[in-house]
Image: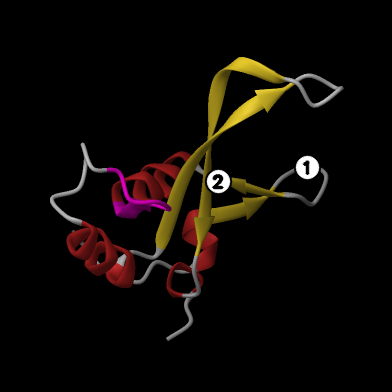
Amino acid sequence: MDQAVVPLDDVLRLGEEGRPEAGRDGFEWALAQGSFSHYESGVHESEQAWRAEQATSPVRAQSDPERYMRLEALPYRSIQGGLSGRPCGAT
């Protein structure tokens, strides 16, 4: 996994309304650097291997169910990603 630090401007940019948006390159970088936010036995060799991956990955990925306005779960999920300090240029 490439652990190069990517400046925030290369991962996110401000959209028309001043909200952060991921550019295509930044989004693809984040996907490539991501690790699951939870241990998954069919994906990870072991819980210890997952923890080691978490320790080096600057991006977390998880999926959550979409919901109706009354908070009832829909039959599909959305991917969510979170960036740690490293992609934002922190050390």
> Residue 1 is drawn in which quadrant?
bottom left
Residue identifier under label 2: 22
Q: Residue at x 46, y 69 (%)?
A: 7
Task: Give how far across and how far down residue 41 sits, in percent.
Answer: 23, 43
Picture quarter with the C terminus = bottom left
Q: Is residue 37 magenta?
A: yes
Classify mark 2: helix, strand or loop.
Answer: strand
Note whether 40 is above or below 46 in the view shown.
above
Query: Marks 2/1: CA distance?
Result: 13 Å
Tell me if residue 62 can be seen. yes
Sequence-first disc among 2 and 1:
1
**Residue farthest top in this picture:** 75
Q: Is 44 on the left or on the right of 82, as rendered?
A: left
Say how the picture is coloured: secondary structure
Task: Give how far across and how far down residue 42 sits, in percent.
Answer: 21, 36
Task: Give how far across and how far down residue 80 sits, in percent.
Answer: 54, 42
Number of other residues with Cα within 10 Å of mark 1, as a class: few under 14, some 14 to 19, many 20 or more: few
Classify mark 1: helix, strand or loop.
Answer: loop
Tell me if residue 4 can be seen. no
Q: Is 19 on the left or on the right of 41, as rendered?
A: right
Q: Residue at x 65, y 16 (%)?
A: 74
Q: Nearer the viewer, residue 68 or 16?
A: 68
Task: Give how far across and how far down residue 13 sits, in percent.
Answer: 61, 53
Q: Is residue 30 magenta?
A: no
Q: Residue at x 35, y 52 (%)?
A: 34
> Residue 65 is drawn in which quadrant?
top right
The span shown in magenta is 33-40
Residue identifier under label 1: 16
Query: Type of residue at label 1?
Result: Glu
**Residue farthest bottom in this picture:** 91
